Amino acid sequence: MRRAEKEQVVAKWHQAIDEAAHIILSGYRGLTGKEITELRRRIREAGGRMRVVKKTLFQRALEGRDESALGEHMEGPIAVTFVSGDPMTVLKAMHEFARDHDQLDLRASWIEDELLQASQVEELAILPPREELLGRLAAAMSAPLAQLAAVLQAVPRDFVLTLQAVAKQREGEAPA
């Protein structure tokens, strides 16, 4: 590859990094061409773009950027996934694929301007969907209010029950 071609590739990676809000690095050694095509399809459906990169050129594109910390995790064949939208759907798609294909290994990611190690990426990938988490949060926030309402209702209810008991007791005493 000539120098001019390399500069074009680095410029292309610069642009891809600028356009992507999130970047996920993964190793793919041992996957067949058919399996990589299936992985790319799943990632594309989830809203990402996976590209196999030449490490030295991609590291040049990362130089001088916050994302340059990703360079430490580039060993062996590397695939870079660029995500513009929600990274969770792409991570879940990749994690699901990795369950069936041990050769795919999620190495690191740059999400929300923060470097996440492989273990952190795995933890994110197994989180429940956003809607479910929001539902759990709403339930957790409404539980104390429901308990407070029950306590506040108990005071007048207990007062009325006490009055009824006193009234029954007095009715029972009157004839005697």
Image (spheres, helix red, strand yellow):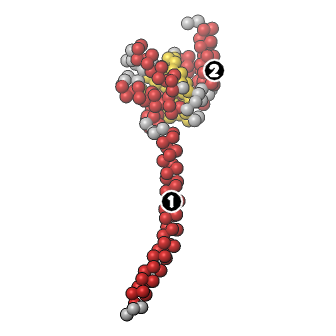
Image-based side of 3 in relation to 77, left or right: right
- Who is closer to the viewer here, 156 or 41? 156
Identify which residue is drawn at 45% across, 34% down.
Answer: 125
Label 1 neighbour load within 10 Å: few <14, some 14-19, many 20+:
few
Q: Earlier in the sequence, mark 2 or mark 1?
A: 2
Give the residue at mark 2.
15
Q: Which element is circle 2 on?
A: helix
Q: Percent from the top left, x then y, of residue 61?
A: 59, 20
Quarter of the rendering occupied by the N terminus: top right
Please identify the quarter of the rendering in which residue 83 is found: top right
Please state which amino acid type lies under the numbered disc 1. Answer: Ala
Considering every residue shown, the one lying at the far bottom of the view is 176
Q: Looking at the picture, how far across and down is residue 100, in whole percent?
A: 36, 25
Percent from the top left, x then y, of residue 2? 58, 6
Which residue is at 63% across, 8% downward? Answer: 4
Q: Residue at x 43, y 36 (%)?
A: 126
Query: Which residue lies most toward the front here?
Result: 175
Seen in the picture, residue 98 relative to 143 is either above or below; the reply is above
Amino acid type assigned to the residue bearing label 2 in the image? Gln
Give the quarter of the image for residue 107.
top left
* Residue 59 seen anywhere in this rendered image of the structure: yes
Quadrant that contains the C terminus: bottom left
Q: Residue 63, can we see it?
A: no
> Residue 62 at what x, y percent from top left?
59, 24
Residue visible at 51% across and 49% down in the picture: 137
Closer to the camera in the image, 164 or 80? 164
Q: What is the spatial separation of the Cα atoms under label 2 and label 1, in whole angstroms?
A: 52 Å
Residue beneath disc 1: 146
